[in-house]
Image (cartoon, grey):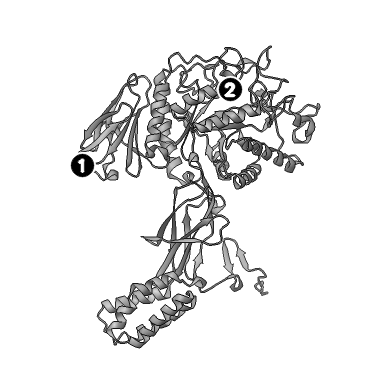
Amino acid sequence: MATTKRPTAKSKNITNGTSTRTSLHSIQNGKMRAVIDKVMPCIDGGLYPIKRTVGEPVIVKADVFADGHDTLVVTLRYRNSGEKTWNELPMEFLGNDRWQGEFVTSLVGEMEYAVAARVDHFLSWQSGFKKRVESGQDAEALKTEVLIGADLLGEIAKRASAEDTKKIKALQASLKKKAGTTESVSEALSDTLTRFAEQYPDESITAQSNIYRVTVDPPKAGFSTWVEIFPRSWSQTPGKHGTFKDCERLLMDFAEMGFDVLYLPPIHPIGVTKRKGKNNSTVAQAGDVGSPWAIGSKEGGHKAIHPELGTLDDFQRFVKKARSLGIDVALDIAFQCSPDHSYVKEHPQWFKWRPDGTVQYAENPPKKYEDVLPFNFETDDWKNLWLELKSIFEFWIQQGVTIFRVDNPHTKSFAFWEWCISELKRDYPETIFLSEAFTRPKVMYRLAKLGYTHSYTYFTWRNNKPDLQAYLTELTTTDVKEFFRPNFWANTPDILSEEFLHYAPPSAFMLRYALAATLSSNIGIYEPAFSLCLNKPLVKGKEEYVDSEKYEIKAWDMSQFNIRPFIKRINQIRKENPALQQTNNLTFTQVEVAPQVESEYLIAYLKSYGNNHLLTVVNHHPSQAQEGWVRVPLEALGIQEGEPYRVRELITNTEFVWNKAWNYIRLNPNELVAAIFRIEPK
């Protein structure tokens, strides 16, 4: 019978099915015995960075172990990107080979972190020596052990500074001389020797994990309150096109209401060809102003301002005045063109052309957007397209804008976003990007991984208690929390929630705002439609507003009933309470209408930050009073059952004293849609 000789591997790693054999030559250092595994946080094996804001902690955990019973030293290494030297902190042993360490981000930009571990021979010897002493062995019996320790001290001396080398050698000589005496035992166990061992580790046997990255954003990335307006609707003369100068008078109001980001839809010239009419009509009438998202005309494109809004100087002045009041102006970046945009003639290769010689417009059958032309990201001229699109961001950054809401990023190339945002964040680390991608979860998450700072979410469509709790649990307790920052919008110019806000009373708007503002640290509303509680859709069953401001100039009457006082109070509470300036510190708590019968409409949750503890209860029924028993998680607050503690309801500024975990709550939406209790342990 013929035999087959096993083939000789030519590569370092031999792979056969699912098993991998490692050749001797592929092992860099067989003396390293520490194993580092399951480092967290880690996104897709470290392919993408986690996100933090400046001053936030990064808690790192890892499985670390080695063969045998020697002493392990495990440290957390961190540094600003580009630095060569690591900062290093000891990690704490949690049990079951799990270790934890923590560092605090210091600068806006990018940081790196890694876990390092080694078997420490001197500390292993010192630990064993201590056990021998505790077991009753006398100094004479320990003489040889003392000499072993002295030899190990000599190895440490080789790694020490010149000054410390002298000190260590003196200690080594003393140990050798006194070996066998009681004095040598105390010297061998001294903290001085321990410190030298820790200060001068043997890096030749120190293992290090992969290096992981953290994007460090400015504070407003972690906590912000957005408001969106159409500047053209704010003229003091009804029917006249508004300007940036007209909008300056709004800034103080918005600042006093607690908004710190003012988001403007595209401010560029609007195309004439195939311009949309009122209520999204495909045929414009004389005087129709069109959609701001149909960008580009003879007056300019993405780097120009609509002439009726004002000049570039007017815009710069507007941005500067807003910033003086603590408000950042955010711009909408929409990478699409009207048929009149100069790009169409100058760079026809950036668009798709149909067999009849016309350019392909945007479609979402059966919808047609003939006033909008999408870019073709598969063009052979993609490099020049990418550079031009990036230059649009850079132009507006030079005008003082550092926050951008990006329209429909999920319809553009992922590779482009990864490159573009990385380039911009490298040069302008203070920039913030909000992804307007109401699409599939994996696509939304991918965009966040690629660099988007904030993301629109499904909050608008989570309109019952189970759905809200399930969604928030996903956002705040899974790996998603490390890279996906939710920005909860209660409405947008495109979205008047069909299920909840259509024809709804003001209480529906108030409770949705209370939920957004206390569940997420980043929130936004489209104004003044929200505070005026506009609730009529264009068509029943659709989410578009009737007489949408996207297609016409409005003349807003703010003297009529609105819920602005409520919005202002909620925003004030957010600013005064650090617990609401976080998102991932959320814990849902029980609300029962009867023993073991969960309330369908009362939603309760605790948020804590340091000594700031807030229990929020929201009635999610806009027209019916709800009552039940809410459980305060006393164990998380260090309060014993029966111990009195002070509670202040912040919306009404009413104080109570409670002394038990379960407390009765009743919320009538005609009076109060939510209660925010600040719990103050005695």
Q: Residue at x 28, y 43 (%)?
A: 637
Q: Amino acid at mark 1?
A: Glu
Q: Is residue 279 above or below residue 189?
A: above
User: For the residue marked with disc 2, what is the amino acid?
Assistant: Lys
Q: Residues within 10 Å of mark 2 (few under 14, many from 20)?
A: some
Q: Position of residue 179 (x, y in %)?
A: 33, 86
Residue 571 place in picture, x, y as percent: 41, 30
Q: Which residue is mark 1?
A: 641
As rendered, which of 598 and 402 lies closer to the eye?
402
Between discs 2 and 1, the one toward the N terminus: 2
Relative to 74, 128 lies left or right:
left
As rendered, which of 106 and 669 lies closer to the eye? 106
Residue 332 or 664: which is nearer the viewer? 332
Classify 467 as above or below 35.
above
The Cα atoms of the two marked residues, 2 and 1, are separated by: 59 Å
Quarter of the image with the N terminus in it? bottom right
Q: Which label was assigned to residue 169? A: none
Q: Which residue is mark 2?
A: 245
Please tell me in which quadrant of the rendered image residue 233 appears. Answer: top right
